[in-house]
Amino acid sequence: MSNEKDWPLWEIFIRSRAGLNHKHVGSLHAADAEMAIENARDVYTRRNEGISIWVVESKYIKASNPADEESLFEPASDKIYRHPTFYDLPDELKHM
Amino acid sequence: MKSYTKYDPLVEYVLRSADNTLILGHRLSELCGHGPVLEQDIAITNISLDLLGQSRMYLQYAAQQIGNNETEDTLAFLRDGMQFRNCQLTEQPNGDFAHTIIRSFIFDSYHFYFCQSLKSSTDSSLAEIAAKSLKEVTYHRKFSSEWTIRLGDGTAESNERMQKALENLWPYSGELTEEDAVDAKMAAEGIGVDLKDISGSINDYRNNILERAGLKVPEKVFMHSGGKKGLHTEHHGYILAEMQFMQRAYPGLNW
Amino acid sequence: MSESSMLKRFEDKIQREIKIEPRDWMPDEYRKTLVRQISQHAHSEIVGMLPEGNWVTRAPSMRRKVALIAKVQDEAGHGLYLYSAAETLGTSRKEMIDDLHSGKAKYSSIFNYPTLSWADIGAIGWLVDGAAIINQVMLCRTSYGPYARAMVRICKEESFHQRQGYEIMLTLARGSEEQKAMAQDALNRWWWPSLMMFGPPDHESKHSAQSMAWKIKRKSNDELRQSFVDATVPQAKLIDLVIPDPDLKWNEDRGHYDFGEIDWEEFWNVVKGNGPCNKQRLEARNKAHDEGKWVREAAAAFAEKQATRRKDVQQKIAS
């Protein structure tokens, strides 16, 4: 057992094809950003899963607190007027 | 006995690339499961698979040229050492990771310009193989160059290991670009690569990377050669003993 | 919020099949169980590279060679996905790997058996991967989000592994007498250890009940083992290989195959370190890790130097 530290952890985001968002696929270790991209290529795109890679060192990700879930997200749930189904229109009207 | 077979020049020429990629791919595959970090284990294995894939294309083409029921497998598993045409560099052992990286760096820097030039071969099969390989080799060269810089410019220990690996392997760098009669004939016919032509770019590229890595190019080195003619180092026989074991122990079967 | 109300909320989520995510509150024991299970699973993938890697340089054809390398490489990838999943629970990869190397952490005992012939590569793909897939398909529905997502990815990639193994066995079984004998010998040696992969029988499995309640596991060891036997027997018949169990027979009433008693003494012996290859496997892992130390240190040192250089340049530009 040594005092050696792991290389930093990086979160990996892959765009699977043009027109789609980069999507989080997992993480890996790398000494620097360049290496993180190459490792991501070898680890997460061996089967043509991607055309573009983002890497972010995990410690820089700021996340919302699960305990705030109710106050952050529930207030949106009763604002049904934001959705098209809220509005009553005659059946004769097609395509709107 | 098949020893010292003379192939016709095109086959000779194709076998050189087939065997360079086969033997280096084999060496790198030995590291599968034994890499210094999990991520690098996967990376090295990817490169090994690229090289073996390239080798298969060359072997299949060579087999087709030879005819006589040769296949990629008879060529890989049933030739003896003196029929192998790989440069001696590719058969050198993995050693520590510094040796693995330097061996790849020396090879990849050659291989990149080789494939780039072979892409315009008048032989359409070779041109096609080269075009496909070049994409992979571009990545290999980037990978081994970055690691050369990283380890050369890392710690005192890593610099020392890299310098030592460079001293040990540099004597095998010359053969890659040393032109012999087969190379000259193939180049003259527009089939093969003019090695004199690409040597300058290879040297410039290597010097640039090694300088950034803080490594000194060994001077006044005696260059070994012979691999292209079937003359190998002692390591080669053990690679074949392992690689060909099944086909030798159980001749003529399908697996 | 009090601990008891958080626990209630947690259990309610489990009940409603809502995945638990890294930053959610979870009972310590749930976290510990997951770290233990996921890291063991990761170690199994990594150690599992060794017995198959043993034949990479001796594969009998170019086609077999690249397929085997790609498969062993996948195991490395799967180990990596799993270590990543475990790291979301607050344990570093280094801690997990140190535990593996010191012998403290366990991994699947199957990988302590040797690969003695080429047919063993077929048998591992067919039986060991076959058994693993049954377990892993269940784990795609496990309650911890990152673990479930890693398993989905792994299952997708693993689908070629078992086919690769079975194809090798099929080729041998249809080949020469010596090839057929080689295949049968491999089946004889790998059959029982494969059944042991599902772990001790339900009545002796100490972690099972809690793991089932938390939906970390969704099926019991014995249930999974039975599905494996039921799936594999017809596959063996199809290629005329004989499963080495005189008690194996179809039970019409149960709608399952009955099979013989597993030698649990052997199982516990291998778990305790007395398998044919326990020592060699750990030595190989330790050797690779120790020999890689200077590489990891150098890359870290280089990254630090580069960061400092960038900062210097930025300061120069700013001043």
Image (spheres, rainbow, N blue to C red):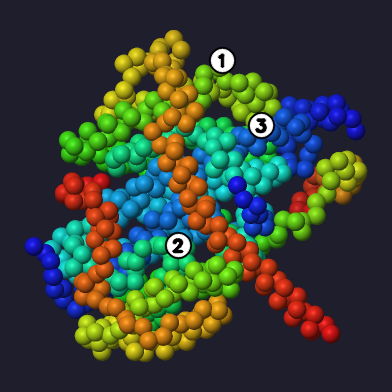
Q: Nearer the viewer, residue B31 or C290?
A: C290
- Residue B185 lies, in percent from the top left, at 22, 86
Q: Quadrant of residue B96?
A: bottom left
How far is disc 1 from disc 3 in space, using C-alphas? Answer: 19 Å
* Kind of residue indicated by mark 2: Asp
Query: Where does label 2 land, which residue?
Result: B96
- Answer whether labels 1 and 3 touch (C-beta < 8 Å): no
* Kind of residue indicated by mark 3: Thr
Q: Nearer the viewer, mark 2 or mark 1?
A: 2
Q: Residue at x 38, y 56 (%)?
A: B30
Q: Most extreme residue toward the left, as rendered?
A: B1
Specify whether residue B82 is in view: yes
- Residue B195 lies, in percent from the top left, at 33, 86
Tag shown at residue C33: 3
Q: Residue at x 72, y 44 (%)?
A: C90
- Answer whether labels 2 and 1 touch (C-beta < 8 Å): no
Q: Residue at x 32, y 87 (%)?
A: B194
Tag shown at residue C203: 1
Chain letter of the residue carrying label 3: C
